[in-house]
Amino acid sequence: MILFIQGHIEAMGDYHNHLAESGMVDGRWRPDVIAVANILRYEPDETPDEWLAKARKSVGAGMATGLKVNQRLRSHTDLATALATAPVDAPPPRTIHSAKGLEFPAVCVVMTSQKAGRILDYLEGDTSNGADEDARKIYVAASRAERLLVMAIPKNTVGRMQALFTSVGCAVEIHNI
């Protein structure tokens, strides 16, 4: 969403092309995005206009040439309603490393297409593929969930992930997005 707002991509499907064209390594940007998400947290004492100003400032520095953040992040009559329903007491987004030792009611773990297959290979028994550290990180993240674990994974790995979870007695519900 940040790349879209900043005008670096034209549609959400352009993400991977943008990474390839700009030489970005998928995943290295996550701490920066989490920092922006924490900045965008709506505080109960803020007005919608104050929140919008904060949002504009947090993404404005990275705008594509020729675009202005006010063009992309406009005020809307329903902004107050949208912000009023935000869960103001929810924990902020975190990296896997910063969540170690903590627990949360719900956790969403995102696995990139570059790593998901190798991690699943490792979890299915191919321990020679060098994915042990990546699998450990996924375990750390997934084990932080108290009641709900959401896995955002590439579509081509869904069946394997479902089989892995159901083999250890976990209930699985799949939502394709």
Image: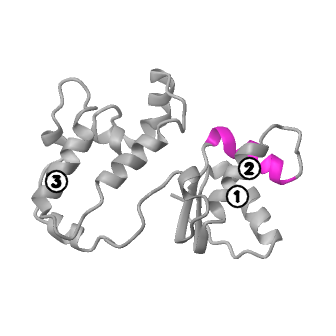
Residue type at mark 3 is: Leu
Badge 2 density bin: few <14, some 14–19, many ≥20, Cα 10 Å: some
Is residue 35 rendered to the left or right of residue 130? left
3D distance between C-alphas at marks 1 and 2: 6 Å
Q: CB atoms at circles 3 and 1 under 8 Å apart?
A: no
Q: What is the number of the mark on residue 135?
A: 2
In terms of depth relative to the viewer, which is nearer, 135 or 114? 135
Q: CB atoms at circles 1 and 2 under 8 Å apart?
A: yes
Place residue 165 in its image quadrant: bottom right
Badge 3 density bin: few <14, some 14–19, many ≥20, Cα 10 Å: many
Q: Is residue 122 magenta?
A: yes
Above or below 31: residue 26 = above
Residue type at mark 2 is: Ala
Where is residue 163 drawn, in percent x and y? Answer: 78, 64
Where disc 3 sits, the SS reads helix
Where is residue 48 drawn, in percent x and y? Answer: 14, 62
In terms of depth relative to the viewer, which is nearer, 136 or 16? 136
Q: What is the number of the mark on residue 139?
A: 1
Whichever of callouts 3 and 1 sits on the residue coming sooner in the sequence is 3
Q: Residue furthest front?
A: 101
Where disc 1 sits, the SS reads helix
Which stretch did the figure color magenta?
A: 113-124
Q: Residue drawn 52% across and 35% down?
A: 28
Q: What is the number of the mark on residue 52?
A: 3
